[in-house]
Image (cartoon, rainbow, N blue to C red):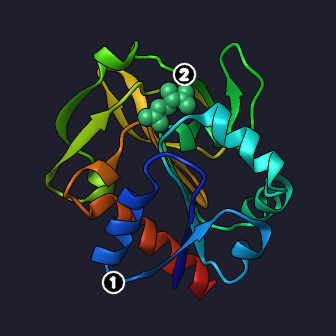
Amino acid sequence: MVIGILGFQGSVIEHQKMIEKLGEKYKIVKKIEDLKGIDGIIFPGGESTTMAKLLHIFGLYSPLRDAIANGLPVFGTCAGMILLAKEIVGEEPHFGLMDIKVRRNAYGSQIDSFSTHQKIEEFGNHEIPLVFIRAPWIEEISGETRVLYRLDGKIVCARENNMLVSSFHPELTNDLSVHQYFIRMIEENNRG
Ligand code: GLN
């Protein structure tokens, strides 16, 4: 299994380290050829508008959108979640693939970043650290999207078939369970 990590900017190395710890291979994706042979892709946290611009500049936007629309497993953390959303409050969407409406910087500015520990049943029976940095939340879901976790009433983790998104950053913690879950999504997809 090879897991792509969109490599323009943001928490790329942090995701890479999680994949390495779980014993899987990774590939940093920055150009069209890098999409060959990947079994899934991670969109890291960072700045969604910058990533979207670079996706267009490097010609990755359409092939990547097609691949995800055709079932390539994707895990979007924070900015990555914003990239996938069909609706962004007050802005045009980017990939527009997932039936979620997101609000950017919903928790306020950089100084309003925070962390907490919560149990998310989909990922296991223990509490995991949740780190929020200028995070979005999901205001609404529709279609086949499932809420995986609400924090104080706000949706911060969801899944729609091959797409997994979180407002928080598992890659900035020592807990591997969310990445482990994504690897299981890829295994299930590879089995067909
Ligand atoms: N605020 C960023 C955005 O809107 C997301 C922040 C993050 O990924 N930590 O793209």
Foreground of the two, 139 or 169: 169
* Residue at the image point whose x is 75% and y is 31% from the top: 93
Determine whether the residue tagged by mark 1 lies in a helix, strand or loop.
Answer: loop
Q: Is residue 95 visible?
A: no
Q: Which residue is mark 2?
A: 104
* Residue at the image point whose x is 46% and y is 56% from the top: 12
User: From the image, which quarter does the C terminus lie in?
Assistant: bottom right
Q: Is residue 63 left or right of residue 115?
A: right
Determine whether the residue tagged by mark 2 lies in a helix, strand or loop.
Answer: loop
From this view, report whether residue 125 is shown above or below residue 186: above
Q: Is residue 44 left or right of residue 41?
A: left
Q: Which residue is mark 1?
A: 23
Residue 149 drawn at (x, y percent): 36, 38
Amino acid tagged 2: Arg
Q: Kindly identify which numbered label has been placed on residue 126.
A: none
Q: Quadrant of residue 175?
A: bottom left
Q: Is mark 2 within 8 Å of ligand 1?
A: yes
Residue 29 drawn at (x, y percent): 63, 66
